[in-house]
Amino acid sequence: MHIFLTGDFQIGKSTLINKVLENLPACRLGGFRTISVADIPGAFGSVYILSASGGAEPSYGDENRVGIRGGSGPAGFPEVFDRRGIEILSGSEKCDLILMDEIGKMERNSPLFIARVLELLDGDVPVFGVLRKEGSTPLQEAIRDHSNVRLIEVTAENRDTLAPELIRYFSELLMSRRDSGGAFVYRHGELGTEILMIRGKGGWGFPKGHVEYGEDLKAAAVREVREETGIDIRLEGEFSYTTPSARKDEKRNVTYFIGKAVGGELSPQISEVRSAEWVRAEDVLDRIHFPEDIPAWLTALNAIGPI
């Protein structure tokens, strides 16, 4: 579900958005911000469109000036929305979260920009935005009526309580979409080949966890095994197996690798797992709780070799 904030002028919508973004897990942020700058005599100032992802020092010039706020009302430059706005929104589908701060009247004559915004609203990447309360342009009405948009009015009474609610909502949403890395960890002992298993809330499975920002799947697998079980591993071979998350409410995949135990002591992370054990390879199949893990394990077992 996309979230758009609306409310009276200068009630604190953008301030609320900034507070939420500052408290979310690190993520790839796409989308745009609009910034007002008092740089024109006789007017409230220019409005510039900037990339939400930051990066280079922002520029303020004709190439990204999308409008002017004057005494007679805002005047938009539709060609800038259709050029610079489209450039900024390119590749947004690859981001974790898309910012749209804000949508109002200035873009009403920018068909390319409007189409792009609506395309993103029909997509899977969550959008967090501001919708100007005043006005009823076709784009504003389309956002208000969109089946996947929740519109929240910000007031002086609720703006302080909204922040923790929105932080919790987007944090959970982002993590539910973030892919995980895990490993089938083995060691050779007196009883033959043993496999490291963990027991979580749902039952027995294999160590895995969300990829952190700037981390790849293999690094996540090594880190998660260490954090959840205390065991250090070395990934071996080219084996990888990707399967959808067992949780039907999550839009993420889990990629498993094969790892050999090379150190550490078995010490389950109580905050994440209930227990961790070395299990004889021939007994693993009987313990697996999630059906999605079975083909992954059988494929890995074949790659590990004789037990």
Image (cartoon, grey):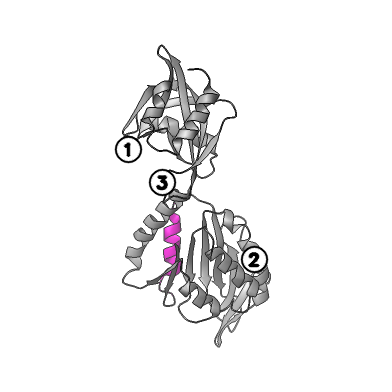
User: Compared with residue 285, is residue 115 higher up or lower down, i.e. above or below?
Assistant: below
Mark 3 lies on a secondary structure that is loop
Tell me where residue 70 sits by quadrant. Answer: bottom right
Residue type indicated by callout 1: Ser
How far from the left and from the top, in percent, is residue 151?
A: 42, 70
On the image, numbered disc 1 is attached to which residue?
271
Query: Which numbered marker is on residue 302?
Result: none
User: Compared with residue 46, is residue 127 higher up or lower down, i.e. above or below?
Assistant: above
**Left/right of residue 80 with respect to residue 132 in the rendered view:** right
**Left/right of residue 141 with respect to residue 283 in the rendered view:** right
Residue in the picture at 55% in, 54% down: 95
Mark 1 or 2, nearer chain start: 2
Disc 3 packing (10 Å; few <14; some 14–19; many ≥20) = few
On the image, numbered disc 3 is attached to which residue?
247
Task: Please name which of the two marks, 3 or 2, marks the residue nearer to the observer.
Answer: 3
Task: Please name which of the two marks, 3 or 1, marks the residue nearer to the observer.
Answer: 3
Asked whether residue 20 is drawn in magenta, I would say: yes
Region in magenta: 10-24
How far from the left and from the top, in percent, is residue 72?
A: 55, 88
Identify the main secondary structure in magenta: helix
Tell me where residue 89 sits by quadrant. Answer: bottom right
Mark 2 lies on a secondary structure that is helix
Mark 1 lies on a secondary structure that is loop
Work out which quarter of the rendered image holds the N terminus and state it.
bottom left
Disc 2 packing (10 Å; few <14; some 14–19; many ≥20) = some
Residue type indicated by callout 3: Arg
Query: Which numbered marker is on residue 86?
Result: 2
Residue in the picture at 35% in, 64% down: 162
